[in-house]
Image: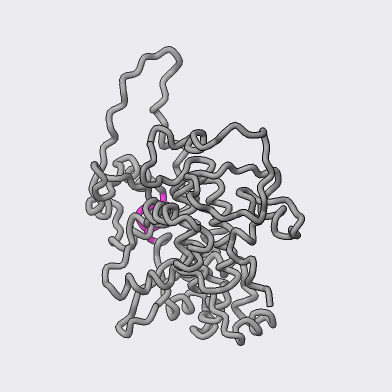
């Protein structure tokens, strides 16, 4: 499909990302007063069969799962993922099946993407480096160099949205950024990957773990001082259902690409992780050796001795001999807005530390 064909298709109708969700439960509701028996477990099929019935290649199926176009469920006993038969039926009932689903997960490289947009490959590369289009996945070529792949559907959307960038002179701001050596492809890939993983979970510790996955061990230790919390973040971090690189070289490359490497991106991830940890600690503490699982929600009650109702912490005594599993969090203002510009006499953040101090950046600008 060319850009012109995509534009005509989009002006005629827009398709939904997860079309048919409203009708998935149709027929499952009963009228008031009607007795119902416990619903039988929904029938599922193996991934191989689902791939055949949907007319996709295995890589296309895995990408569709990653994008949230196909819902999968965990196998019995934590086995391989399976697909509900009703999910397959929903997808097969789509008016554009099977070509519509295959087109939504079709990926192209630089040369094919440039041909799709009707521009030179060099211009396509500049647009990608500037962050105008974002890669969705990658592979390693024979020289172990990263080859980025882009969704053809997203490129068509970009052509409709920003036609002026496909011809004429490159805008001055973009030229300046590219001449400085900027390349936002890996950063945009990380950002989209993190966003998609966050959508798959509501657990605050798992969400904090997703943010932590973009920080190297040094930055992570500065933000999360408790080693047991760091171990817990590593344990609960959600991983993609599919798409894990098989070769050692691909796994090593994936590990490198997942880490933020730009100062402002690192700071952004540190802030998100700090705020996410506040929410996670409110929900429950990270497990520590010797914790009583039945008393984890109130671990500090046994340590509290009769004292005045409220004691102002001394900022000079912030050392922790044995940090409790959870710190009470008391925020009266949005943490990012209230703490970013605080002075030494400003309001203290949860745990008696300001946000930037908790990020471990309190002495980085001192000369």
**In the visual, does 78 lie left or right of 223?**
left
Is residue 246 or residue 135 the one in the foreground?
A: 246
Residue ID at (47%, 55%): 226
- Please determine whether, in this image, residue 232 is positioned above or below residue 106: above
In the rendered image, which quarter is residue 56 located in?
bottom left
Q: Quadrant of the N terminus?
A: bottom left
Q: How many marks?
A: 0
The answer to whether residue 57 shows anywhere in this view is yes
Q: Can you give x and y, in whole percent of width and height, for residue 288 in the image?
A: 40, 46
Q: Is residue 259 above or below residue 299?
A: below
* Residue 335, percent from left and from top: 66, 51
Question: In which quarter of the view is residue 157 placed?
Answer: bottom right
Asked if residue 173 is among those painted magenta in the image, a careful observer would answer no
Q: Residue furthest front?
A: 306
Q: Is residue 78 left or right of residue 66?
A: left
Left or right position of 159 against 67: right
Give x and y (percent) for residue 315. Answer: 67, 54
Seen from the viewer's position, the closer of residues 195 and 163 is: 195
Q: How is the protein colored in the picture?
A: one colour
Left or right for 77, reference 108: left
Q: Residue at x 24, y 48 (%)?
A: 79
Indicate whether 158 appears above or below 212.
Answer: below
Q: Which residues, given as a range, are shown in magenta?
A: 95-102
Specify whether residue 101 is in view: no
**Between residues 218 and 242, which one lies in front from this camera angle?**
218
Where is residue 328? Give x, y as percent: 58, 42
Between 355 and 180, the one lying in front of the other is 355
Which quarter of the rendered picture does the C terminus lie within? Answer: bottom right
Q: Is residue 362 above or below residue 228?
A: below
Q: Name the residue rendered at 70%, 43% in the picture.
A: 332
């Amino acid at each position: 499909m060319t850009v012109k064909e995509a534009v005509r298709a989009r002006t005629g109708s827009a398709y939904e990302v997860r079309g048919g969700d409203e009708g998935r439960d149709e027929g499952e509701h009963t009228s008031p007063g009607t007795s119902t028996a416990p619903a039988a477990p929904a029938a599922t099929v193996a991934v191989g069969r689902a791939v055949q019935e949907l007319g996709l290649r295995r890589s296309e199926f895995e990408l569709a799962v990653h994008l949230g176009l196909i819902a999968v469920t965990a196998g019995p006993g934590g086995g391989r993922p399976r697909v509900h038969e009703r999910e397959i039926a929903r997808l097969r009932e789509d008016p554009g099946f099977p070509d519509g689903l295959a087109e939504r997960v079709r990926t192209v490289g630089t040369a094919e993407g440039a041909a799709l947009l009707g521009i030179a490959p060099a211009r396509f590369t500049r647009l990608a480096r500037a962050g105008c289009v974002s890669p969705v996945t990658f592979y390693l070529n024979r020289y172990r160099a990263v080859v980025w792949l882009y969704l053809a559907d997203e490129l068509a959307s970009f052509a409709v949205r920003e036609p002026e960038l496909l011809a004429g002179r490159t805008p001055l701001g973009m030229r300046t950024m590219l001449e400085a050596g900027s390349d936002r492809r890996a950063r945009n890939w990380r950002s989209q990957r993190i966003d998609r993983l966050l959508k798959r979970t509501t657990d605050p510790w798992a969400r904090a773990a997703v943010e932590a996955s973009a920080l190297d061990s040094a930055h992570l230790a500065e933000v999360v001082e408790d080693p047991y919390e760091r171990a817990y973040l590593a344990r609960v971090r959600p991983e993609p259902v599919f798409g894990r690189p098989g070769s050692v070289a691909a796994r090593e490359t994936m590990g490198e690409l997942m880490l933020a490497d730009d100062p402002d991106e690192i700071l952004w991830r540190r802030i998100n992780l700090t705020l996410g940890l506040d929410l996670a600690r409110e929900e429950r503490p990270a497990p520590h050796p010797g914790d009583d699982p039945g008393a984890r929600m109130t671990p500090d009650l046994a340590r509290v001795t009769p004292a005045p109702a409220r004691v102002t912490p001394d900022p000079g005594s912030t050392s922790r001999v044995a940090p409790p599993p959870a710190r009470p969090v008391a925020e009266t203002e949005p943490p990012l807005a209230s703490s970013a510009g605080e002075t030494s006499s400003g309001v203290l953040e949860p745990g008696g530390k300001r946000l930037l101090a908790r990020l471990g950046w309190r002495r980085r600008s001192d000369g």
